[in-house]
Amino acid sequence: MAGSLLLPGRQTQAQAAKPAEIKVGIATYLSGPASVFGVPGRQAAEMLFDEINEAGGIGGVRVRPIFVDEGPGVDHFVGEYRRLVQSEGVHLLFAAISSADCLACTPLADELKRPTLLWDCGTQRIFEDNRFEYSFRTQANATPEILSALLYLLRAKPDFRSIAVVNQDYAWGRDSWEIFRTGMQALKPGVRIAAELFPRFGATDYSTEITRLLALRPDVVLSTTWGGDLDAFIRQSSDRRLFERSTFVLPLAESSLERVGKALPAGHIIGARGDHWFLHPNPRDQALLARFTDNFRKRFNAYPIYPCHHMAQAVFAMKAGYEKAMAAKNGGWPTDAELAGAFRGLEFPSLTSSVRIREDGQGLENQIIGTSHHTDKYPFPVMTDMVVFPAEMVTTPVGQKSTDWLKTLKPDIVQGLPQPVAYRP
């Protein structure tokens, strides 16, 4: 590859020459309990990269993904990020699922001057605490994902008086609870917090937490847990009939529905971390969504879950970013800096609507929340009474911190919510 032996970040005409292929480093969970979430993301990337290459590539150049595993932890990931840039010579990186990994790689992207798309991590702190020139998020962050679930709860169950939280004990679990609690205190002050439970990431046994919740009987149980951890929590809660005692709010549950099946009863609040759902009530392009869903099912024998949609958004953003950068050079190949500049302000399609990357690097993405519902057509719950929250309504404005902005919200925001849409077979 031209320029692959140059020091990272040095801009020369050689780096701007059209490469033989576009190498894309992609970090996702390929091992451990989170792989139930990470492997479908990899599968979506493989399928979409094949489709791009079959259509002639990007600017006539084929794309090649190089996958690395987030499973071994942050230190391993940082080493892999450097290796991808310095040894593999990747042109672009998709990183990562873990919020801790994204917090680690964003300063690296600036140091190595390599464009990086944050394809799935949720922590809102990245662009609120710092400004980066080479990192861009192609989906929402924790604030709209969690605030949407809170607003849905306030309309669906306005009289709840107590709540407990069961979240994974790391950046995402702690941050998402802070967002929910801060918003709740502004919009419904006086709710009693019955318990704050933070089992370790990767936990397989929730008997202690479930026993405590059965004794406390909170009106609402919030859990932003995800992956195999969420699967285990849902199954064990079902076995002990905890769902009959409390209303669950599970903002990330869409990714677990097919795996947990009937263990998740009807009547609980679930989300999809964005505007994603293969049964979306009003997609911008129904044919595009149906084609992606059908192709994924035929190839991998499963329905695409939201990591698949997030990966698709990163792929679509990559393609749109290259095309924008090349158009600015009258067809010339962009340097790393020119490609990075193209992502700021970029608007690109998703599988259901569109996403715009703001001037601070944060993506604006709608959010869909619904209620679990059982039907004979699927062996797992689907969403009904779905509400699509506009991104601007639930996203912290540029230059503000989420915790400060949430404190300014007024209860009448609930009156302005979009109307729910029932499941249509």
Image (cartoon, helix red, strand yellow):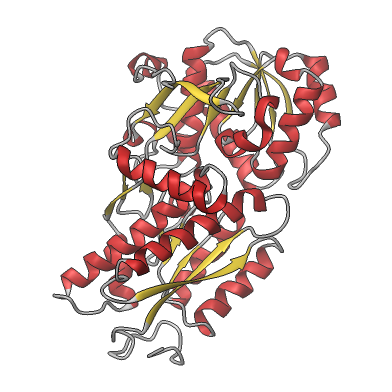
Residue appearing at x 71%, y 18% in the figure: 243
Specify whether residue 364 is in view.
no
Residue appearing at x 35%, y 65% in the figure: 52
Answer with the quarter of the image where residue 268 lies: top right
Q: Position of residue 330 (x, y in %)?
A: 13, 75
Decide which of 51, 215 is in the foreground and name it.
51
Q: Is residue 360 above or below residue 51?
A: above
Numbered marks: total: 0
Residue appearing at x 68%, y 68% in the figure: 75
Q: Position of residue 80 (x, y in %)?
A: 61, 73
Answer with the quarter of the image where residue 335 lies: bottom left
Find the residue positioned furthest to the front: 298
Q: Position of residue 327 (x, y in %)?
A: 17, 69
Answer with the quarter of the image where residue 16 lies: bottom left
Specify whether residue 297 is in view.
yes
Q: Is residue 422 above or below residue 255?
A: above
Residue appearing at x 57%, y 54% in the figure: 97
Which quarter shows the N terminus? Answer: bottom left
Which quarter shows the C terminus? Answer: top left
Instruction: Answer left or right for 247 relative to 408.
Output: right
Find the residue positioned furthest to the left: 330
Decide which of 178, 54 is in the foreground and name it.
54
Instruction: Answer left or right for 71 relative to 63.
Output: right
Q: Position of residue 388 (x, y in %)?
A: 38, 28
